[in-house]
Amino acid sequence: MTILGVDYYPEHWPADRWPADARLMHESGLQVVRLAEFAWARMEPAEGQFEWDWLDRAVDVLSGAGLQVILGTPTAAPPAWLTRAYPDILPVDAQRRTRSFGGRRHYCPNSPTYRAHTRRIVAALAGRYGGHAAVIGWQIDNEFGGGQTARCYCEDCAAAFRQWLRRRYGDLDALNDAWGAVFWSQTYTDWEQIEPPGLANEKPNPSHGLDYDRFASDSWVDYQQLQLDVLRAHVAPAQFVTTNLMALFTDLDYFKLAGPLDFVTWDNYPTGQTERWGSQLYPPPSDAGADGQASHAYDVGDPMITGLGHDLMRGLKDQPFWVMEQQPGYINWGRYNPTPVPGVVRLWTWEDVAHGADAVVYFRWRACLYAQEQYHSGLLRHDGAPDQGLHDVRALKAERALLDAVRGATVAAEVALLLSYEDLWALDSQPHHGEFGYLRHLFTYYRALQRAGVGVDIAPPARELDPSRYKLVVAPTLHLVDEAHAENLRRYVAGGGHLLLSIRSGFKTTSNRVVDTPLPGLLRDLVGATVAAWHSLPPGVTYLLELVEMDGPSRPKSSPKAAFTARIWAEALEPHTAASLARFTGGPLAGRAAAVVNHVGRGQVVYWGMWADDAMADAVLGWMVEAAGVESAAAEVPPGVKVLRRRSGADEFLFLLNLGAREASVLLTSPDLTDAHTGQPAGRSVQLAPRAVRVLRRAL
Ligand code: GAL
Ligand code: ZN
């Protein structure tokens, strides 16, 4: 059963309203309610004085109405009394300013004091509800790192950082060597000399900076583990434990954070995410080859940005996930906060499900009358009447059977896209070109795969890649490479896998130093070529190139002459065992190889030596998808539309989502699909109304 639910704050409303709320939730087809993740001050109004009556009653009212409950641990919001009595819990920013009470997340994960209070409140809460029949699971804290709180620079963190470094390097000589500390007399002779970065009058040594990024991320993983241990000691084994993530938020290594959780959940605000991340993800204005964004309706959010969020969240544990907060209408934290038109909340729900969500929980039940989120919608309006979001949710009641049939189906992806937070941190601190963004580069390939109608999983470079599962692996940049990463890829390719590697790969060691061997370092044997030169191209500087071998049937449709223009980044390659795929025809690299293909074992590796624009990404992926035999669900996916697939037993479900404001038609590759609701044949060319979804079905 696909679960639908809602986030509810009983503490914001008079208790005599709760029964009516609970009844309406249940009647509307909702099954679960998340509660209490910011309610510490109500649970413990003074130190050691717990008040559970209100929460007991809220849980009873909800369960009495047939709803199940998820409880949040309230540690994202330490109360005023705690903050005042123990000011050492407060976080310190990079400028060494202590942050104050009045918002949320005002605590340091390394504070021994806060860790002790965390243990107390979590044990008390879990002790009380860990056996409650209505409680199905737990959310730890809320959005670790949100509101720019992932990195703290307090004295507790400085001490913990030194310990972390001791564990990593053992002795100072090793650290000095790994960091290249001989540079500018940075050599350390005592661990106590090492400080968190941030206040030096130059950018930090990149090895120091990357280790701080790793340390800060590990600090949250460790803080989460503290809560996990307390919860698992107190709660029934059937109650799950998770936390809620923020998709494309990059300050934390989400693969590590997700590891110990039962499953991943995330908070999906499509219009906000599009605004927040759009300019970092889409090509910069100076990149004239860009397709630009805005193929989506203004109130729906960008399907590619939402999609990458979903696919990453599914990839963290390689398993289905929940949406723990789903945008229910307008939000409050954008620059612009459009109100979705009727039907959009239903569309988002299907989009979540199409990408692999097992549950969709709407944030929040009723719009709040006061404080920071007054301007945020809920399923109910401020006055308590149903808002459009609730009408949409109620409309989903008629689609229950289909929602349930899809639950548990696997997202059928034959392509893996590799993403590494450490590569991202390293490159974003030394981009070398102001428009070179790690995620922007990756997003170019992600979008090209979506345009090709090909499903994609996101995986970390260390995950074992099985060639019988993934016909194609795309690694836009593998920057910090160790022998284990290289061996993982060698094994995959030797076993028959097709690998696309691109620029700046193999450039560094994992301690963020440049390798002392010819590029691409440890990946050179796989690539079968040497990167002889690399050029950062300022805006307006372009190098022309042409394809050498991608002619014939797989010649790119988008570019009849198969000529391209490189912008942002270009590398000149010298093939040894590889064959040239593309050659520069203009500029200082004219005549040299720009891309190569190398046959290794039963597989092959393409190294694409340029920052790809959309035309290039379509061309190289179009060719590789065909060469690898990756199945595409659609012959053509128009802008604003996406086509996603899930498989369950003998059935395949095809989700056609039009997130655009205009009618669109999708040309399918399979003739024998039927409408999943009506059973009628769907035909090859399927029309989609604006902001509409269609679910088709096919027997496998
Ligand atoms: C989320 C957060 C919620 C609420 C919501 C508003 O990021 O977890 O508590 O603030 O945003 O959109
Ligand atoms: Zn700290």
Image: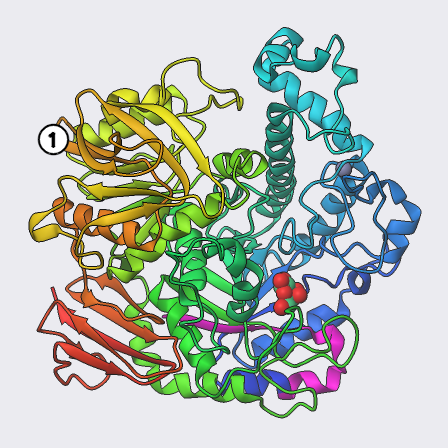
Residue 622, given in percent of the width and then of the height, sits at 20, 52
- Quadrant housing residue 307: bottom left
Residue 160, given in percent of the width and then of the height, sits at 72, 27
Determine whether 95 is above or below 201 in the image: below
Determine whether 165 is above or below 477 in the image: above
| Residue topped by disc 1 | 602
Which amino acid is tagged 1?
Answer: Arg
- Helix, strand or loop at label 1? It is loop
Residue at x 74% of width, y 20% of height: 194
> For the magenta stretch, what is the residue range?
1-20
Cβ of mark 1 under 8 Å from ligand 1: the answer is no
Left-right relation of 147 to 6: right
- Please identify the quadrant where the C terminus is shown: bottom left
Residue 666, given in percent of the width and then of the height, sits at 22, 74
Q: Quadrant of ligand 2?
A: top right
- Please identify the quadrant where the N terminus is shown: bottom left
Determine whether 579 is above or below 397 in the image: above
**Which residue is more in the foreground, 619 or 298?**
619
Left-right relation of 33 to 603: right
